[in-house]
Image: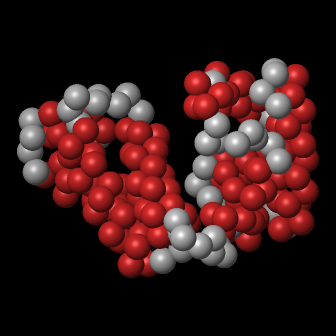
């Protein structure tokens, strides 16, 4: 079943859409959730929540890029669950480490200015990513969007952990400089 047929099932309110989404994208959704949450049980519950959210939001949403849309929903649901679980304490784990790494590059996400400028910031970051070499883009996106560990990125790309770490450090420095030039910092 292709993506258009899958979205058609959602628009027809056919419950087979959920089963097909689970079959086709379940592993992908689970990986995103597990990378953020770090728990098998939480990741499995998160996938169920993602499926429910997709059912509730398609229609009216009609995503052109199903893969990216589903990833965005999974990331959003997992991040919300992570924040709820860690509201009282700031525990260890990959997500905290990833957010700490980016802390120096971005302004405080809770400020009013950040909220108002969110779309412009997203556009600026997208433009910045387009200036990077493909490998640098992949490393950056895997780390900061999919919350993959440095070890997983290195293994996936067949490069050393050291190269991944250095690439991330240099890319963060470039991003910070770019954001300063664009007036975000």
Relative side of 147 to 179, left or right = left
Considering the image in quadrants, where does the C terminus appear?
top right
Residue 79 in picture, x, y percent from top left? 49, 56
Relative side of 175 to 156, left or right = right
Residue 27 in picture, x, y percent from top left? 40, 64
Q: Quadrant of residue 159?
A: bottom right
Query: Could you tell me if residue 20 is visible in this image?
Result: no
Residue 91 in picture, x, y percent from top left? 63, 75
Q: Nearer the viewer, residue 163 or 38?
A: 38
Q: Quadrant of residue 66?
A: top left
Q: Quadrant of residue 46?
A: bottom left
Q: Is residue 175 above or below residue 163?
A: above
Q: Nearer the viewer, residue 38 or 167?
A: 38
The residue lying at 29 percent from left, 28 percent from top is 62
Relative side of 126 to 103, left or right = left
Q: Is residue 162 above or below residue 64?
A: below
Counting every numbered tag in the picture gives 0
Query: Could you tell me if residue 4 is visible in this image?
Result: yes
The residue lying at 91 percent from left, 47 percent from top is 170
Q: Is residue 146 above or below residue 112?
A: below
Residue 53 in picture, x, y percent from top left? 27, 48
């Amino acid at each position: 079943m292709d993506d258009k047929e899958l979205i058609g099932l959602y628009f027809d309110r056919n419950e087979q859409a959920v089963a097909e989404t689970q079959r086709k994208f379940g592993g992908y959704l689970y990986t995103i959730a597990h990378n953020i949450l770090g728990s098998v049980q939480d990741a499995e519950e998160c996938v169920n929540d993602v499926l429910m959210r997709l059912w509730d939001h398609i229609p009216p949403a009609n995503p052109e890029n199903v893969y990216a849309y589903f990833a965005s929903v999974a990331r959003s649901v997992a991040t919300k669950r992570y924040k709820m679980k860690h509201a009282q304490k700031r525990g260890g784990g990959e997500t905290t480490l990833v957010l700490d790494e980016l802390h120096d590059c971005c302004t405080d996400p809770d400020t009013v200015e950040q909220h108002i400028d969110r779309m412009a910031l997203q556009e600026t970051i997208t433009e910045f990513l387009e200036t990077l070499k493909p490998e640098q883009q992949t490393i950056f996106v895997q780390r900061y969007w999919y919350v993959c560990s440095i070890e997983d990125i290195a293994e996936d790309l067949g490069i050393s952990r050291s190269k991944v770490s250095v690439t991330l450090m240099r890319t963060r420095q470039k991003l910070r400089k770019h954001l300063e030039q664009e007036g975000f910092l």
